[in-house]
Amino acid sequence: MGLENWGPHDATKFLAFTANVYRDLYPAIDPARPELRQEGKIVVITGASRGLGQLGFAASFAVAGASAIVLTGRSVDGLKETEQLITKTNPAVRVLCIPLDVTDEHAVNTAFEEIHTKLGTPHVLINNAGILAPPNTITGSNLDTWWAVHEVNIKGPFLVTRAFLHLTGPHPERPTTIINLTSSSSMGTPPGLSPYSMSKTTMYKFTGFLSAEYPDITSVTYDPGVVATDMSRSVGYLKTVSRDTPELSGGAAVWLASGDKKYLSGRVFFANWDVDEVERRKDEIVEQNLLTLWMKGGCGRPGRGCEELWERPGVMFQCINVWMRVNHVRV
């Protein structure tokens, strides 16, 4: 069955790690909950001039009472709109707007110098900025257009995260969280979306390296669901499945930035998943190394599967068929 024939909830259920899935805000991730308060935190959001950056992340962290929210994006007018939304939602939140092209190394470094000078060391980074090229085959794609997606969706998060880490250092005094956005398109090969899908797959490895190199910082690959934004509307077959709300995406991100989520560091988390069940299964997630990118196939000694690789990671290259183990499935 092609994606264009999927029902509105088929993709969400297909990628479900938990028995229950959600498509709208629910009590456990309500940013107004006292347990999810972001008081004292400085939150940096890229791509904050519209879409999820504006209606999801900025709005939700404002409700959660972040001390300051830094908005970056290419549209000055859009950033102003987001600032007004935050001020209306919670006038106590300080807002810093920085027009920014995330692929410009000098501009990114300058932006974080400004953040540090005006607000201090940030505590939460949401790498939300991204672009989607018009769907096209590989042979039909324009090289510059195809590569520009990788520049924004991979180089951008790298530059921004590096500048963020220069401020936080490897051992921050306060809990620090990096949230890298991915997409369910990374789970397969949706025709026409090669640059976007490939760039979003890269986020799994990027997050993995962050977790390995900076273990005192919680780094999570985050799928925000399928929300009806300008980006999703540009892909015809996504119109049917775009039923998730910005409030769901934002609330789940606030949950990720709250409390101790180290057990999810280096892993993928979907906004649709039931966070109460995820919490109950955290020992299982760590012990079985779930929600990570690994290899599928017969490898190592005859008769053993890839479970052996967790004992001998140096031979991981022997396996075939990269896949995402989002479900606890054994083959």
Image: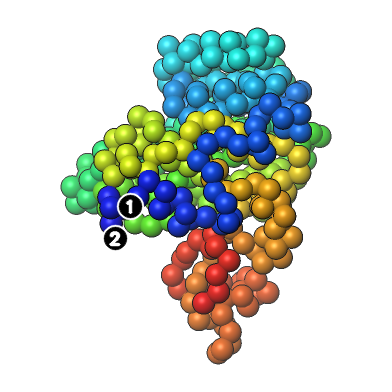
- Categorize mark 2 by other alpha carbons within 10 Å: few (<14), some (14-19), many (20+): few
Q: Which residue is mark 2?
A: 1
Residue type, label 2? Met
Q: Quadrant of residue 302?
A: bottom right
Q: Which residue is mark 1?
A: 6
218 relative position to 1: left or right: right
In front of the other: 151 or 233:
233
How far is mark 2 from mark 1, CA to CA?
7 Å
Q: Quadrant of residue 89?
A: top right
Tell me residue 310's x, y (percent).
Answer: 65, 71
Who's the residue at 65% across and 32% down the image? 30
**Residue 179 visible from this viewpoint:** yes
The local secondary structure at tag 1 comes to: loop
Tell me residue 246's x, y (percent).
Answer: 50, 31
Who's the residue at 76% across and 33% down the image? 35
Callout 2 touching callout 1 (CB < 8 Å): yes
**Residue 104 visible from this viewpoint:** no
247 relative position to 2: left or right: right
Q: Quadrant of the N terminus?
A: bottom left
Q: Quadrant of residue 172?
A: top right
Who's the residue at 47% across and 64% down the image? 323
Instruction: State the residue lying farthest toward the bottom.
Output: 302
In front of the other: 39 or 31:
31
Instruction: State the residue lying farthest toward the right.
Output: 173
208 over 158 or under it: above or below = below
Tell me residue 4's x, y (percent).
Answer: 27, 50
Instruction: State the residue lying farthest toward the left.
Output: 140
Pointer 2 or 1: first along the chain? 2
Number of disc labels: 2
The local secondary structure at tag 2 comes to: loop
Residue type, label 1? Trp
